Image: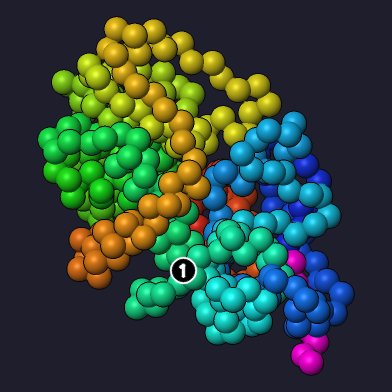
Amino acid sequence: MEVTSNKQVILRNYVTGFPKESDMQLVTAATTELKLPEGSIGVLVKNLYLSCDPYMRGRMTKREPGSYVGCFVPGSPITGYGVAKVLESGDPKFKEGDFVWGMTGWEEYSLITATETLFKIHDIDVPLSYYTGILGMPGITAYAGFHEVCSPKKGETVFVSAASGAVGQLVGQFAKLLGCYVVGSAGSKEKRVKVDLLRNKFGFDEAFNYKEEPNLDAALKRYFPEGIDIYFENVGGKMLDAVLLNMRMNGRIAICGMISQYNLEQTEGVHNLISLISKQVRMQGFVAFSYYHLYGKFLETVLPAIKEGKIIYVEDVVEGLESAPGALAGLFAGRNVGKQVVLVSRD
């Protein structure tokens, strides 16, 4: 029986304001037996890649019950989406050597008892890290949010905020494949790095750095003189307010996230909701796991597009579990370029 130590990233305490690297801590757990407990129907996995996602900020704050996802427990390992290799399985759906993606711990080895949250990886002709992003939760988020919530049509005008992130970069490319006019916004201290990425790598028609725009309403009117049919919302706050003034009749807004609000103790109000009435705009929030039943259909669409080079995906990979706290904190400072991933082990 193999015995090993298990490095883990724990949350030290609940967070207020912007998360800091020091809010998390790398610890080494007591010696762990790499064996399933007798009679367990879970799976024992070795974690390979971990995903840093904006929704995790909400889990770092103590909230009343009722949220769609629970809070982290201070002193315990952070949990999130990841890619892992099965070492032993008590669940007949998985066997030793399988690769899986789903909810796991921020640690080297995890015992996963909620195996219903795991997806077996069948196609390994693409990088395994893609299952933290384009072929995982962010991918199905982009696909369902755009195609199912927004009901897009060829030729429509589409605006994507936080467009260089894990979800936004895909939404823009899905829209271009459909024949839409697409504009993305991003914020980058490196001036035009993310904006150039949107135009030159992902094929957006136009892109702008919102940090360089003193008047967001004027910026949107510059890029959408006829208005916006579809807004894929990742930011909230002042950006949403400006978009509401620029929606076209019967426009659709998919509320995926509001990263500008996650670190505020008092969230900002929205002032232009009356535009929904006169323009007959539909605004709908959604969460990815409500659409996991479409995952097979999603793979049939996206895997060939990746292999044919029709969809490009950019990752920002840091190496080592010790790099995970800084990577997650950096997400909220806009430091990442593309999907933020932590490489824990190459096998």
Residues packed near mark 1 inside 10 Å, few (<14), some (14 to 19) or many (20 plus)? many
Residue 88 placement, left or right of 304 = right
**Type of the residue with mark 1:** Ser
Q: Residue at x 69, y 43 (%)?
A: 70
Q: Which residue reaches farthest bottom?
A: 1
The residue located at (64%, 82%) in the rendering is 87
Q: Nearer the viewer, residue 331 or 151?
A: 151
Q: Magenta segment, which residues? A: 1-8
* Residue at 35%, 28% in the rendered image: 253
Query: Outermost residue toward the right?
Result: 30
Q: Position of residue 90 (x, y in %)?
A: 67, 76
Is 32 a magenta residue?
A: no
Quadrant of the frame with the C terminus = bottom right
Residue 153 locus on image (x, y percent) = 17, 36
- Nearer the observer, 347 or 85: 85
Secondary structure mostly seen in the magenta stretch: strand
